[in-house]
Image (cartoon, grey):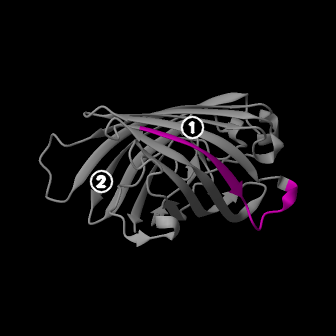
Amino acid sequence: MLLSTGSLAAPDRPDPTPQPDRWTGPFGGVFHADFTVASDYGQNGISSTGNQPAVIVGLNWHSQSLLPDGPRLRFYVSALGVNTSFPEAGTGVEIDLAAGFKLGLFDRKLSIDAGYIRYFFPGFSPDFALEFGEFSLRVDYDFGPFTASGRLRYSPDTIGHAGFTWNKRGMIIVPIDFVPLPDGLKLKAYGSLGNLWVEKPDILDLPGNDYWFWQLGVVTSFWGLDLTLAYTDTNITTEGCGNTRACEGRFFASITKVF
């Protein structure tokens, strides 16, 4: 049962380009929504759609700063829905719900995000035990020429009751603003490297307790859209991936609109 799950910021890629606050929400907060069409969807380097296209819909709400006279501290609630396809479980939908706090320091150059994510798979048989939760900590710092991002996630009992997991990932994002670009067009490159450690890899048909995954890509922003072109891969062989293509290196593309 080779399975992979998604994340609320879209798989291993930089967050979508922020848009001006438009939708006023309850308690003085603000809503945003995003819509993505992608040639593949996965997390930690493993495809969750059988290397097939995906449609991703996200919605998030965040409060105004909880510290009016201090650093910006916001509470947020997020949701994501996407089509999925697993070798044994079949096809269906993944829904991710998250809540947490995000703190901005040093003129928002430093961002700290601590929260909890719950993954649901309505329509799939409960025999696969797909539902699980993760605690997440992410730290980003904008150095100017580049932004460094570190993320750590822990699940006490991951998907399929495969035991506890530690998921570590680092990312570097570099704005490409040193070349002339048309007005309104922005370009950035990124690279990420991660490692997933799982207590009971045999349940997920993984060859060992841990594996590495990485991704290189570029994001072009224009007309309120983010276009991503990237390459992702793992160190899992085809034989160690249930004889599927879900873990092999591949190019993918996606286009995202934030509302």
Front residue of 132 and 99: 99
Q: Is residue 34 above or below residue 152?
A: below
Name which of mark 2 and mark 1 comes first in the sequence: 1
Q: Which residues are magenta?
A: 111-127
Q: Is residue 115 magenta?
A: yes
Disc 2 marks which residue? 220
Q: Which residue: 26% across, 49% down?
A: 187
Disc 1 marks which residue? 137
Q: Residue furthest front?
A: 69
Q: Which residue: 53% across, 62% down?
A: 53
Q: Does residue 109 appear to the left or right of 197 in the view shown? A: left
Residue 97 in which image quadrant: bottom right
Amino acid type of the residue that numbered disc 2 sits on in the rendered structure: Thr
Could you classify mark 2 by the number of other residues whose Cα lies within 10 Å: few (under 14), some (14-19), or many (20 or more)?
some
Label 1, secondary structure: give it: strand
Front residue of 78 and 85: 78
Q: Residue furthest top?
A: 209
Q: Give x and y (percent) for residue 95.
A: 65, 61
Q: Is residue 213 magenta?
A: no
Residue 104 in which image quadrant: top left
